[in-house]
Every structure is written in structure tokens, then in C-alpha cells.
Image (cartoon, grey):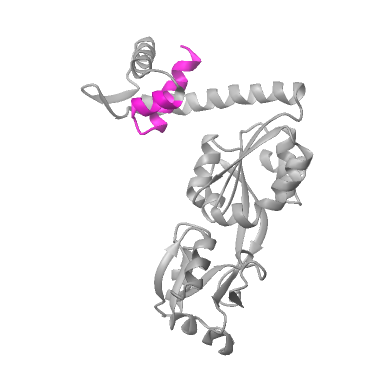
Amino acid sequence: MKIHQLRYVREVAKRGLNISLAAEALHTSQPGISKQIQLLEEELHLQIFQRNGKRLIGLTEPGRSILELAERVIRDMENIKRVGEEFCQEEVGTLTIAATHTQARYCLPAAVKSFIEQFPDVKLTIHQGSPIQVAEQVASGEADLGLATEAIGHHEKLLCLPCYQWNRSVVVPLGHPLLDDLPLTLRKIADYPLITYDSGVTGGSQIPAVFEAGHILPNIVLTAIDADVIKTYVGLGLGIGLLASMAYDKERDANLAEIDASHLFPVNTTYLGIRRDAYLRGYAYHMIQLLAPNYDKSAVNTALKI
């Protein structure tokens, strides 16, 4: 049994049982992956993958157990490598952060600027996606840290540290009738075409639920995953926007006006997610504290042990 065989099994499973995609990701050949998986199966005297002819169609029951163990072995080897890097090259390495579009655009910049100034030799990568995608990237090891609302807080493989709370605002073109019709209510919002977040991102799933609880049907004409897209279409006069308050900037969004909607919707918490079995480099702890100031290295390690 060889480590590269376990990597092949993991990558094939990750790529939806597509050996060609796995070979491309691992910079090797499709026949080479197939041969190595076959050799591993012969050594173990069992099938890891279910097959229909030459096509893989699923994992066998023992295959699922082998995949889980293979992922653990590969993570442990990566952690061992990080230990060596930590003591040989303390301030050199890589750090990958997965974040939703809103967090990447409005929460991360200040922390990233401070981090790069202190650790110029660390290559920083930011992946953007939905909360579910963020959680999956951290859980799979594709990302070291994840920043999102909602789904990330419920993933069993992740330790989630609360960063901050936020609520929503309505944005409208200057001179809009709502500006003279305060206080804002759900029914007043429902009187206008509404542009807001897709249900899969940034607290978007809560919005229909709040209207439903009030027995009000909003006129949602457009949804997006990016607050800047929402503001663009509001600026074009296609409707009013409902988005995270942090996404409105008085100077940058001078063509729009903001109306506080925090009294209408529940408070949201943005979490920082970390794999419970990950080995964190020293600079990763620094980034964590930039994003979640209440958690220094000691507090993070204590939380990881719970």
C-alpha cells in the first residue's frame, strides 16, 4: 500500500468518480490511476469502487471506510509536513481562506491588509462560494479557514468561532418614496419589487421565512449572491434592495440611500470555521485573531480540544 494510491482513491471520489478529472487534477495519466487503484484492491482483496464495465458507479461499503481512513492518513501527513515547515520556515508558507462573497468583499480586506504587512512571505489565497461550499472546502482541507454565516456553524467536522453579528438594510435610489414613509415595515417592503440575496447565501434563507411568519408575500424579482450585484440593479431602478448592512458604503454608494431594517429581521452571526483535526501554522493563528479578536492561540487550542 502506497500513499499515492490513497491519494488516487480520494481524488477519484472527490471528482464524482471521474478518473479523467482526477488524473488532470493530480497531473498524471488516467491509465496510471486505474492501474494503481486496481493494485490496491488486489492487495486488500476487496473492491473499493462499484463498476459497470469499466465505468465507476459508486463506492462499495468497505470502499467508504477506506476512503474515510485514506482522508485521515493524508491529512495527518499534511499536518506532519506543516510541523516541519513551522519550525524551519516560521513565516513562509501558504494560507487559504474560503469565504462568502459578502465576507470576502466587506469583512476580509482590513484583516488581509494587516496580515500581508506582517507576513509578506506567506502566499494568501481567497476562495469565494456559498456557505455550504465554504464549509465543505474547510472540511475537505482545500481551505485552512472559512468565513461564512449559517451553514458553516452546523458542520460536525468544524470548530466555529463567532466573529461578529450583523443585520440588514434596505437600499433604494435617492428620492425613493420609502425614504418619506418611515418607520419601515415588512408590508411596505412588499409593496415594491425586491432584489435580495439568493436563498443559499449570506442569511438569504431567513428572508422568505420572516415574510411568511408575517403572512406577507414579498415581490422578489431578482436574487443574487453578491451585494454589489444587488446594488447595481437597484441603481438601475429595477427594485429596492435588501442586503447586509455592512455592504452599504455611503461614499461608494452615493447614488443610493440606506434604510435600517434591523428591527424586522433576526440578527445573524458570522463564524470562522477551522477543521478540528488541522495543524495550524503560527501565522494562521494570527489571521484568526484578526478576524475573531477574542480568540488568541491559547483560546483556539482550548476550543479545539472541547
Furthest-left residue in this view: 53
Residue 93 x %, y %: 68, 29
Q: Is residue 233 above or below residue 32?
A: below
Magenta span includes 105:
no
Point out the stretch of residues depicted in magenta. 1-25
Which one is nearer the viewer's eye here, 277 or 253? Answer: 253
Q: Quadrant of residue 25?
A: top left
Residue 42 x %, y %: 34, 11
Q: Is residue 108 left or right of residue 23?
A: right
Residue 211 x %, y %: 45, 75
Q: Is residue 211 left or right of residue 295?
A: left
Q: State the predominant SS element of the stretch in magenta.
A: helix
Residue 110 x %, y %: 71, 52
Q: Quadrant of the C terminus?
A: top right
Q: Is residue 233 left or right of residue 145?
A: left
For residue 205, say whether it is visible.
yes
Residue depicted at 51% across the width and 72% down the height: 235
Q: Is residue 138 left or right of residue 31?
A: right
Residue depicted at 76% across the width and 40% down the height: 297
